[in-house]
Image (spheres, rainbow, N blue to C red):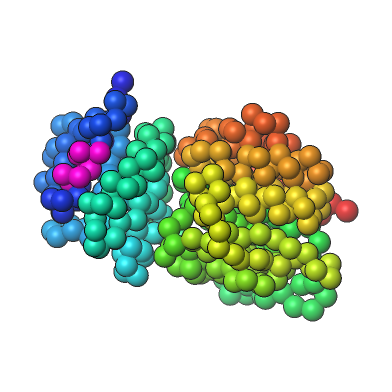
Amino acid sequence: MAIKVFVVDDSAVVRQTLMHLIKDDPDIELAGSAPNPLIAAPMLRRHRPDVLLLDIEMPGMDGLTFLRQIMDESPIPTVICSTLTEAGSKMALDAMSAGAVAVVAKPRLGLKQFLEDSRRELLQTLKAASRARPRAGAGSARTPAPAATRAPPDGLHALSVNKPVVLGSSTGGTQAIESVLLALPGDAPGIAIVQHMPEKFTAMYAQRLDGTCAMNVREARDGDRLERGVVLIAPGGRHMQLRKAGGQYFAQIADGPPVNRHKPSVDVLFRSAAECAGRDALAVILTGMGDDGARGMKALHDRGARTLAQNEETCVVFGMPKEAIALGAADAVLPLDRIAAEILRFDRRG
């Protein structure tokens, strides 16, 4: 059966363009559209769609407030389609924390042409979202880690990192990553992360994680050292690799073409870790659509690294882990709530 998509956006141009793009795909049908949440709410109750495509900044009621209501009452897989100004980026990130499974960025100018040019990616995102399993209450507030647990690494303790952790995720990954990091102490091994995100998101996402986790989290800059107690998030729109010098690991940030349609790409990070760390590394692949990271994890596995994949039951979208498992790249398949413990167990190994 065709995937039923409902569009909520205050722009008539956006609604009409999306309706045009959707109707040309035999696997997707438009279940309806509305210019704001107040009009959309009763329509959604009558004609429950498989996916909600939701703008953020709208009159009457903003998309974030509407999404929280939906997730409290009856969760629907939701894709945010928004202009990501600084304020818009924060609201869209809040929406992902509240349970949205993906974000599609749209410019303020040239909307119609942009949406037509991005048709393939948009339709793939909607199809992946239809397989998502959003959970009610995902947007509940987090309690920041006590300051006493956030002692920054220093001295020989910081330099002793010789077992880096690399982690990749996509759809549903913002919440999954937060869940893992909240369970780790402030002196956990250094972690390099690629999360598929629009360019304006990653610095704000890292800042948010830094305020809730015991580890120090920041958007990676070229030359940053991966040390104990530090999490480096790959910047949106650029690739991140690991390199090794003097027994230490550093982030290398560079432009380049998309890999597996993504920039940053999990495969790029994982392959670099296979080259410079090999058996000393631990790789983790979490929820996400597509296959980015699967081949990079296989390269790590073949070099003796420890490799973990999130299980289907706890994934929002069981795409990336499924592909890694199919390649024989995963040493273990674990529920999300066991990933942090496995990271610490790996760190304790000799």
In the image, residue 347 lies at what x, y percent?
78, 55
Residue at 77 percent across and 53 percent down: it is 275
The answer to whether residue 262 of the structure is visible from this angle is yes
Q: Nearer the viewer, residue 146 or 221?
A: 221
Dividing the image into 4 quarters, which one contains the N terminus? Answer: top left
The residue closer to the viewer here, 252 or 200, is 252
Of residue 263 and residue 82, the one placed in the foreground of this image is: 263
> Residue 161's x, y, as percent?
79, 65
59 vs 1, left or right, is left
Name the main secondary structure of what is drawn in magenta: helix
Magenta range is 15-21
**Measured from the top left, where is residue 35 in percent x and y?**
13, 50
Residue 56: percent from left, percent from top: 26, 57
Q: Is residue 176 left or right of residue 86?
A: right
Q: Residue at x 57, y 43 (%)?
A: 292
Q: Does the segment drawn in magenta span residue 285? A: no
In this view, the residue farthest toward the bottom is 155
What's the residue at 24%, 58% (across, down)? 110
In reply to whether residue 20 is colored magenta, the answer given is: yes
Q: Taking 276 as reference, is 223 above or below it? A: below
Residue 2 vertical position relative to residue 236 in the rendered view, above or below: above
Q: Is residue 166 above or below residue 157?
A: above
Image quadrant where residue 302 sits? top right
